Image: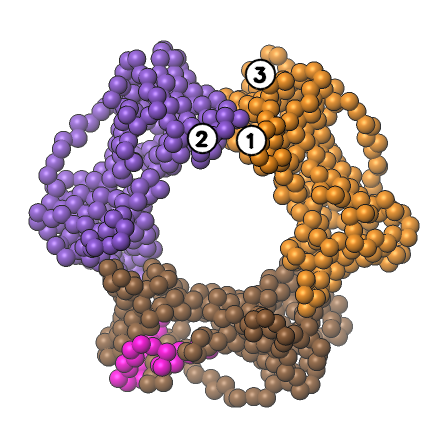
Chain colours: A purple, B orange, C brown
Amino acid sequence: MLELRLVQGSLLKKVLEAIKDLVNDANFDCSATGFSLQAMDSSHVALVALLLRSEGFEHYRCDKNISMGMNLGNMSKMLKCAGNDDIITIKADDGSDTVTFMFESPTQDKISDFEMKLMDIDSEHLGIPEAEYHAIVRMPSAEFARICKDLASIGDTVVISVTKEGVKFSTRGDIGTANIVLRQNTTVDKPEEATIIEMNEPVSLTFALRYMNSFTKATPLSNTVTISLSSELPVVVEYKIAEMGYVRFYLAPKIEEDEDETKPQV
Amino acid sequence: MLELRLVQGSLLKKVLEAIKDLVNDANFDCSATGFSLQAMDSSHVALVALLLRSEGFEHYRCDKNISMGMNLGNMSKMLKCAGNDDIITIKADDGSDTVTFMFESPTQDKISDFEMKLMDIDSEHLGIPEAEYHAIVRMPSAEFARICKDLASIGDTVVISVTKEGVKFSTRGDIGTANIVLRQNTTVDKPEEATIIEMNEPVSLTFALRYMNSFTKATPLSNTVTISLSSELPVVVEYKIAEMGYVRFYLAPKIEEDEDETKPQV
Amino acid sequence: MLELRLVQGSLLKKVLEAIKDLVNDANFDCSATGFSLQAMDSSHVALVALLLRSEGFEHYRCDKNISMGMNLGNMSKMLKCAGNDDIITIKADDGSDTVTFMFESPTQDKISDFEMKLMDIDSEHLGIPEAEYHAIVRMPSAEFARICKDLASIGDTVVISVTKEGVKFSTRGDIGTANIVLRQNTTVDKPEEATIIEMNEPVSLTFALRYMNSFTKATPLSNTVTISLSSELPVVVEYKIAEMGYVRFYLAPKIEEDEDETKPQV
C-alpha cells in the first residue's frame, strides 16, 4: 500500500516537465526515505536523479520498497490535468499494475482520479559517489537558462570556464563567436540573485548545449541552480526543490581536440 | 432594409469565434424578433442554434423577414477587423446580394465598412421541441472547458453521469482512465462559480469529446454553461449571451456497446 | 578604430527587428555624423534608410569613414542575446574583418562579447532628394499596423486616399471589400494618439500590402508613423527613433489599370 499526499501538487507537475523530454520511461523508487528516480536519457548520455524526501509530503505511507515503471510522457499528460493549486496524492495497491493520481481542488469541490498502467522497465541503479569538485557555481536559474538558450543560437557546444573572478560561457559557430562572463556577486538585494563561486582550482570544460538546454526545463523548480565542475567528472547541474529534495542532471564533458578549429576554444 | 446596431460589438465577434469551426456556411435569419441562426455542423452530427433578440440591439430595423447565407469563415475574418470596443452595425438593402458590417470606434474617429457577398444556402429549419430533461447541470463555463480539454488528452469519449451529489466526467484511453467529479456547490462567493444540479432521475450518457471541445469555443460568451441531459434526447450545451439570447449546441449521445472494452464504462 | 556605445541598447535590437525581414545583407556606414544604412529589399522593390546620429550615443568614436557589410539575420541573432536593459557597444578595429557587439547588464555583473564576421557587399548609395509631398499623414503607429494587418486578411493591395477630412484605406478581395476611414483628430489627450493631416492636394495611391506589413515591423520603435504621399513619388513611411534618427521605408505606388477589376478602386 502506497499513499503519498503532496499539498503543493504543482511541484510534481514541474518535476515532470523538467525531465519528461530527456527520459521516456523510468522507474520511480519508493521507500520510507522518499520518492526518487534515477534514469539515463534516451541516448544514454545524460543522467537524471530526482529525490522527493518523505518529510516533504503531508502524508507519506509506503509499506515496503517498491519500484514503479512509468512512461513519463503519459504521466505528464495526466499531471497536466491537475490544477496548479491542487493537492496531488499518488496511490498504489500492493501488487497492482496501475498507479492512481488523485487531484483535489483547494475547495474540495473537484476531485479527479487518473489511473495509469505501470510498465516493466529494466534499469540498474548507478551508485553516484560523493565527489570533490574543482569549482561550484551557484547562480540564478533563469540567467543560466537564458545563457544556454542564447549560446545555442550561435553554436552547438559551450565551454564553461571558472576563475576566481567569475564564470565564462563561450561558444563558436558559423556566424561567429560568443563569450558571456558573469562576475562573482554576493552583494545583491535578494540572495537568489547572487552569483557565488567556490573554487579550488580553475576549470574549463566543454559540453553539448542541446543537453544543457534540456536541463534548464527544470528552471521553474528553483530560483537558483548549482553547477559543480571537475575536469575528470561529469558536471552536475542541480535544481533544489524547496525543503523536499532536488533534481540533478549529470553530463560528461566533451573531449576537446586541439586541432579541431570548429570546436570552441577557451 | 436591414439595420442592426449592436453597441457591444465584441459579442458578435465572440459568437462567430464560437461557431465558425463547427459550421462553414449558414443562413442568418432576421425577423422582428431577432437575429438568429440554426445549422448542422459540417459532418451533420451536431446542431447549433443562435439567438440575438432584437431588444438587445441599440437600433433594430428589419422591414421584412430575410434569410442571409454567409460563409462563417469569411464573416469571422471581417469581424476580426473590428476593435473589441467597437460598435458593430449589420446593414443590408432589400434584394441586395451583399451585407455590410460597419465598425465605429468609441471615439468615432475610425469608421470601417466591410462588405461581404451573400451565398445561396439550402437549409431546412428543424423544429426543436421543448423537452423535459432528466438532469440539468449549471457550472462555470471555464471549468467545463478545462474538463473537456483534460479528458481529450486521455480518451475520445466522455461519460457524463449525474447524481444528486454531483456530476462525474469519465474517459478511458490507451494510457489509462480518468474520472473527474464535481460536487454540487451553491454556497460560493460569486454566483457564477456555483455548480448547481437539478435532477429528476440519475442519468449517464456518452459523448464524443471532439464535439464537446468544439462547443467550448463559446466559453468567452458566458461565465456559466448549462448542460441538459436526458437518456432519449440530444444533450443541450447552452451559453447565455447577456440579456440578448444564447448559443445552444445539440449532440446525440453515443450508444454504448457493453462488450466494447475500448469505450469508457460508467 | 570604431567604438559606439549606446546606453539604450534595446533601440538597436528594435531596429534590427524592423528591417531584418526586408533586407538580408547590407552595409552599415559609419562616419562622424552617425551610423546609417541604406538598402533595397531582397526583391528590389522597397528601400530602407536608417540613421542613428552620433549625438544619440553615449560615446561615439569613428576615426575614419567605414562601411561594414553584415548579414542582418545573423546580426539579429546576436542582438537577441542582449537584455532589453543592456548597454550595447559596437566595436571594430581598422582593417578587421569582424565586428564585435558588447552587451553590459545594468549592474555590470554580466558582460557579453559577440563577434561576427563581416561580408563584402556591393551596393550603390542612392541619392534621395528632398521632395514636396501632396499629403503627409501622421498617425499612431499601432493603428497603422492594425489597419495594414486587417486589410491583408481581405485583399493584396491598399488604396490610400487623403482628403482634408481624413485618410481612407481600402482593399478588395475574393470575399468582399473593406474601407477604413480615419478622421483628422488633433484634440486628443495624448499627442501620440493624434491623426494629423497636412494636405496640399488630394491624393489616392495603391500599394502592395505585403510591403506595408513588413514596414510595420518598425512599430515598436515609435508611437507615431508619418506617411508622405505624392502621385509621382514613392511613399515614405517614417518611424522616428527618439532623439537619434529614423527608419524610413520607400515604396513605389502600383499603377492602376482602369480595366482591371481585381484591383481595388478608390
Q: Quadrant of the C terminus of chain B?
A: top right
Report the residue marked by disc 1: B147
Q: Is residue B227 above or below residue C47?
A: above
- The amino acid type, in three-letter code, at marker 3 is Gln
Residue A257 visible in the shown view: no
Which residue is found at the position 66% from the left and 34% from the top?
Answer: B225
What x and y, as percent, mark residue B246?
74, 39
Q: Nearer the viewer, mark 1 or mark 3?
A: 1
- Tell me the chain of label 1: B
Q: Residues within 10 Å of mark 1 (few under 14, many from 20)?
A: some
- Measured as percent of width and height from the top left, residue A123 is found at 27, 23
> Given the image, what chain letter belongs to the residue carrying mark 3?
B
Residue A234 location (% of width, % of height): 18, 40
- The amino acid type of the residue labelled 2 equals Asp
Q: Position of residue B150 (x, y in %)?
A: 52, 31
Residue plotted at (35% across, 63% down): C85
Between discs 1 and 3, the one toward the N terminus: 1
The answer to whether the residues at label 1 and label 3 have Cβ atoms under 8 Å apart is no
Q: Is residue C82 shown above or below A202? A: below
Tags 2 and 3 touching, CB below 8 Å: no
For the residue carrying disc 2, how many other residues have a C-alpha within 10 Å: few (<14), some (14-19), or many (20+)?
Answer: many
Depth order, front residue of B1/A89: A89
Left or right of residue C93: residue B155 = right
| Residue at which label 3 appears | B265
Q: Nearer the viewer, mark 1 or mark 2?
A: 2
Q: What stretch of residues is rendered in magenta? A: C48-71
Is residue A86 visible in this depiction of the protein? yes
Q: In terms of secondary structure, what is the magenta stretch mainly?
A: strand
